[in-house]
Image (cartoon, helix red, strand yellow):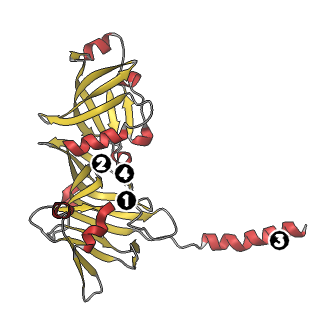
């Protein structure tokens, strides 16, 4: 009986402490004209982004640990070229039992073209030309207008036998890939490496040799200031040994003539090669060279 009372006493004492645990405030983030390396072989061309970083624990986000926070995009416009999109799509289909491999993505007359190998018993080369659009629930829909396997048009053949793409290729929602009938639905937030990204995709369009994704109000929500930068404001965030409270940290491109080439996994190399200044308001302004320039000098 004494043990039972002791256990109850512990619960009574601990529960108020848990309930009173303060919520970690989000950190605001803005990006303007940034080429953001999300992997060694993939770059997102961020023309504008406004959002918030949310810690996944009771501690502030740690920029060195991209899994310590999530990023919620409020407004943004992000473009991606064929090489980077090819890399991300191959990463998404890199799992045991995947029916698609050796994928290559390109653009043709305002549409997305994909080539690769389909494995269903035997390996068969295929090509798909598809339109792209945003869905009401914020995912990206690819609707095939041309499908060929081994160079032979197959859309009519599939229709004749009542076969859809989702009968051939399994969906992987955990990787942002869902097939429904003949359409492919992609969730960009699940296709990217950490941090986990969320946001409402309002438009997707092929513009020249780029796939452009618009979130929220897109570039219409951009601030009026210029320059190429990444700006962290409000909340607490840690960079290496630096813990900044009520953050006001702006990473600024030392060469504004071209986009700010930034690699989050290698940011310390750029930090060492740059310099920082404090403002009278105790904010921090850090000037960095482009990541590509560092690679050129090595």
Which secondary structure lies at badge 2? strand
Q: Could you tell me if the residues under marks 3 and 2 are in contact, i.e. CB atoms within 8 Å?
A: no
Residue at image x 53%, y 73%?
A: 22
- The tag earlier along the polypeptide, 1 or 2, is 1
Q: Is residue 140 above or below residue 73?
A: above
Classed neighbour count for the residue bearing mark 4: other residues with Cα under 10 Å, few (<14), some (14–19), many (≥20): some
Circle 2 residue: 201
Which circle's residue, 3 or 2, is located before the other in the chain? 3
Residue 71 numbered mark, or none: 1
Judge by depth and name the residue closer to the eye, 238 or 186: 238
Please give the label number shown on residue 6. Answer: 3
Q: Quick one: 101 or 188, which is closer to the camera?
A: 101
Where is residue 212 drawn, in percent x and y? 20, 47
- The Cα–Cα distance between marks 1 and 2, rounded to whole angstroms, is 14 Å
- Dot 1 falls on a residue whose secondary structure is strand
Query: Which quarter of the figure has residue 277?
Result: bottom left
Quick one: label 4 or label 3, which is nearer the N terminus?
Answer: 3
The residues bearing labels 3 and 2 have C-alpha atoms spaced at a distance of: 53 Å
Q: Which residue is mark 4?
A: 193
Q: How far apart in space, not on screen, are marks 4 and 2 (Cα)?
A: 18 Å
Quadrant, the C terminus: bottom left
Depth check: give the residue in front, 47 or 253.
Answer: 253
Q: Position of residue 35 (x, y in %)?
A: 21, 58
Q: Is residue 195 above or below residue 93?
A: below
- The image shows residue 93, relative to residue 288, as above or below, that is above
Q: Is residue 34 above or below residue 279?
A: above
């Amino acid at each position: 009986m004494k043990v039972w009372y002791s256990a109850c006493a512990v619960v009574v004492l601990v529960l108020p402490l848990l309930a009173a645990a303060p919520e970690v405030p989000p950190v605001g983030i803005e990006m303007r004209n940034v080429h953001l390396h999300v992997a060694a072989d993939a770059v997102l061309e961020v023309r504008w982004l406004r959002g918030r970083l949310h810690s996944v624990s009771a501690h502030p986000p740690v920029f060195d640990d991209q899994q310590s926070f999530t990023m919620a995009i409020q407004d943004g416009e992000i473009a991606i070229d064929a090489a980077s999109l090819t890399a991300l799509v191959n990463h998404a289909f890199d799992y045991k039992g995947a029916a698609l491999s050796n994928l290559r993505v390109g653009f043709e007359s305002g549409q997305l073209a994909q080539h690769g190998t389909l494995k269903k018993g035997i390996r068969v080369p295929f090509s798909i030309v598809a339109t792209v659009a945003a869905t009401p629930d914020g995912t990206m829909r690819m609707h095939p207008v041309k499908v060929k396997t081994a160079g032979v048009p197959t859309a009519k053949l599939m229709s004749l036998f009542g076969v859809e793409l989702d009968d051939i290729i399994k969906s992987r929602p955990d990787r942002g890939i869902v097939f429904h009938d003949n359409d492919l639905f992609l969730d960009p937030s699940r296709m990217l490496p950490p941090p986990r990204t969320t946001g409402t995709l309002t438009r997707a369009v092929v513009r020249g040799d780029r796939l452009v994704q618009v979130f929220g109000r897109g570039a219409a929500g951009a601030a009026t200031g210029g320059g190429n930068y990444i700006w962290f404001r409000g909340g607490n965030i840690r960079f290496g040994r630096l813990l900044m409270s009520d953050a006001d940290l702006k990473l600024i491109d030392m060469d504004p003539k071209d986009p700010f080439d930034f690699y989050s996994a290698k940011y310390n190399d750029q930090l060492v090669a740059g310099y920082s200044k404090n403002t009278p308001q105790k904010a921090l302004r850090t000037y960095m060279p482009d990541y590509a320039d560092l690679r050129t000098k090595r």
